[in-house]
Image (cartoon, rainbow, N blue to C red):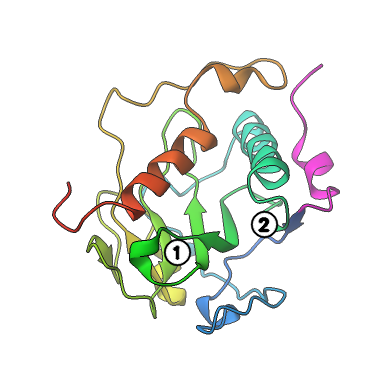
Amino acid sequence: MLILSPASIAAKQSVRSSGRFATVSDHSPAGHIAGAGFAGMPERAKGGSLFSGSRSEYSRAIIAEQVEDIATKFVRGRVDFDGDNADWMIFPAFRLPRIWRRFAAPLMIVFPRDYPTTPPIGFYMPGWLESPNGHFYDTAYHGASAAPTLEGWNWYCCTVNDGCWRPYPARFRGEWRFGDNLWTYITLVNEVLGSPEDAD
């Protein structure tokens, strides 16, 4: 069986699709997550060279399949996903480690144009959050997309060292599981969110 097409993913109930970045104001600080509204994002603000240009159908299909897998097995509920371009996904209520002193908060992952070859660069959380362990900025570094920071998201610094990301060259559905993938990245996200402030 071939890899799922993005069009087939858009029909899944567990994945809510939109082609634009969500504003952070769509998610209230009180933690109540209503249906997310979406705001336009200027094309010129999409980010650096890793985030501009057209995404291949291969990249789009891999992202869509991985997002579907995460939505059905990890959060067992809705995630917001850019079904048009597969540029980003949002966990409306990502469970946080105890050191954050809140149960959950929205968390956005932005996919580089050539994902899965290149991993995401950091991730984004609402600017109204206070990080107990630093690494949380109102702008993006290391070539990460700055576009979400224009919509009220802060960038959390979390990068994969060169040569450490090894995705599997999938040709068929599910083969991406043999290499680094979105599950790998979410494991990294969980580890850094629970790390002490002085951890690098």
- Kindly indicate the quadrant of the structure image that contains residue 17: bottom right
Residue 11 within the segment the image draws in magenta: yes
Q: Is the magenta stretch mostly helix, strand or loop?
A: loop
Q: Residues under labels 2 and 1: Cα distance?
A: 26 Å
| Relative horizontal placement of residue 105, taking residue 80 as reference (left or right) | left
- Which callout, 2 or 1, points to the residue nearer the camera? 2
Which residue in the structure is indicated by mark 2?
79
Q: Outermost residue, front direction?
A: 98
Residue 21 placement (x, y as % from top left): 57, 66
How many other residues sit within 10 Å of disc 1, few (<14), some (14-19) or many (≥20)? few
Image point 53% across, 37% down: which residue?
A: 182
In the depicted view, which residue is nearer to us: 143 or 37?
A: 37
Span colored in magenta: 1-14
Residue 92, image x and y in percent? 60, 65
How many marks can you see? Answer: 2
Quarter of the N terminus within the rendering? top right
Q: Is mark 1 on a helix, strand or loop?
A: helix
Q: Is residue 11 left or right of residue 54?
A: right
**The disc labelled 2 sits on which kind of residue?**
Val
Tag 1 or tag 2, which sits nearer the N-term? Answer: 1
* 76 inside magenta stretch: no
Query: Do tag 2 and tag 1 residues touch (Cβ < 8 Å)?
Result: no
Instruction: Name which residue type carries label 1.
Output: Arg
Q: Mark 1 points at which residue?
A: 44
112 versus 98 height, above or below: above
Q: Where is residue 10 in the image (x, y as percent from the top left)?
A: 80, 49
